[in-house]
Amino acid sequence: MKNTQKAQRHVVVTDFDMERLEALIDKARSTQTRDSKNLQELAEELVRAEVVDPAGIPPDVITMNSKVCLQDLDSKEELVYTLVFPNEADLASGKISILAPVGTAMIGFRTGDSITWPVPGGMKNLKVKKILYQPEAAGDYHL
């Protein structure tokens, strides 16, 4: 995943998400996994992240279990995804794993941000159009 905004973007993660994501990375590193590149990308994102209390995260930031509307900047198609942990991933119902390249790219992005990452046919360009549901904004601090 090459993110064109990676160097300058400010990543914000809740302390609850940070704990669970670090545990996920530690567990995955101790087992053989095909997600090692994505784990490395996620670990790099988390190293630079500003960690905040769940009640203090801005409502326009993608957190774990957020449901977002993304727009494909090439086709103009709108896509709705929920960012989830790997065991909850289900592409047919729009649940994208944090360890999928687009999932790793989404964490910490805000409404209006663009996401660019390589896919087999070239580059995929998406824009975060709207956050439809963010657990913290809804007071669901346990998700």
Image: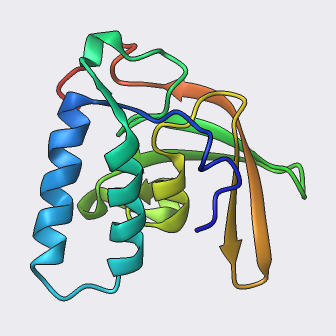
The quadrant of the picture occupied by the C terminus is top left
* Residue at the (18%, 88%) spot, across then down: 32
Q: Quadrant of residue 112?
A: top right
Residue 116 drawn at (x, y percent): 71, 58
Asked whether residue 98 is in view, the answer is no
Asked whether residue 76 is in view, the answer is yes
Looking at the rendered structure, the number of numbered marks drawn on it comes to 0
Q: Quadrant of residue 71?
A: top right
Q: Is residue 66 above or below residue 80?
A: above
* Residue at the (38%, 65%) spot, across then down: 99
Residue 132 drawn at (x, y percent): 56, 26
Q: Is residue 119 above or below residue 78?
A: below
The reply, left or right, for residue 115 in relation to residue 39 is right
* Residue at the (55%, 60%) spot, across then down: 102
Residue 86 drawn at (x, y percent): 29, 63
The quadrant of the picture occupied by the N terminus is bottom right
